[in-house]
Amino acid sequence: MYEQVNPNQDLLTYRSSIIESLLRDMAFAIHQTLDKPDEQNVHDLRRLCLRLRYALRLFGRTLPPRPARKTLRRLRELQNLLAGARSCDVAVATLAQPGIAAAVSKPETRKVTTTLAGERKRSLRPLRLRLRKMQRGDAIGRWRRRLLAVA
């Protein structure tokens, strides 16, 4: 997924390639999640947010401080929105596990699953609004320009 460190490559070039790759993947994942907010797309976007946050922390001293802090804050907010839908997905998958499914009655499982589906649907509304706003405002492009600006 990520390129290996070349011994002749400097840290700034490596940092730029990693962050550029993550931002490109994130832009694609945002588009995918807006088109089809299923379990896999939400999970992929959440993972990319986490990876980008880790990369920003790892390369923090080589990035412009203010844009890095602002991007980290926005990523944290986005991950919190994604967490609502993802938690419901995990709960439904847990209920489907053979050991748990056998211990809980069918009507009770249906009731809980229906409640979780409703909660997931409610949590998707603010997520979609945020993703549309990010897409319309070209947030990923702005992050790219600000984070990878040559000092």
Image (spheres, helix red, strand yellow):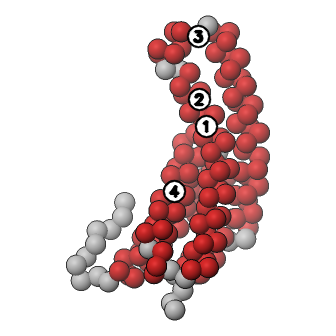
Q: CA distance from mark 1 to mark 2?
A: 6 Å
Q: Amino acid at mark 1?
A: Ser
Q: CA distance from mark 3 to mark 1?
A: 20 Å
Question: Which is more N-terminal, label 2 or label 3?
Answer: 2
Question: Are the residues tagged 1 and 2 within 8 Å (C-beta)?
Answer: yes
Q: Amino acid at mark 2?
A: Ala
Q: Residue at x 69, y 65 (%)?
A: 135
Question: Which is more N-terminal, label 1 or label 3?
Answer: 1
Question: Which is more N-terminal, label 1 or label 4?
Answer: 4
Q: CA distance from mark 3 to mark 2?
A: 14 Å
Q: Which residue is mark 4?
A: 50
Using a 10 Å C-alpha cutoff, classify the residue at mark 4 as few (fewer than 14 neighbours), some (14 to 19) or many (20 or more).
some
Where disc 4 sits, the SS reads helix
Q: Give the label on residue 87, or none.
A: 1
Q: Nearer the viewer, residue 74 or 38?
A: 74
Question: Are the residues tagged 3 and 1 within 8 Å (C-beta)?
Answer: no
Q: Where is residue 120 drawn, in percent x and y?
A: 70, 36
Q: Amino acid at mark 4?
A: Leu
Looking at the image, residue 117 sits to the left or right of residue 42; the answer is right
Q: Which residue is mark 3?
A: 104
Q: Residue at x 74, y 37 (%)?
A: 121
Q: Nearer the viewer, residue 143 or 21?
A: 143
Q: Where is residue 15 drawn, in percent x and y?
A: 41, 76
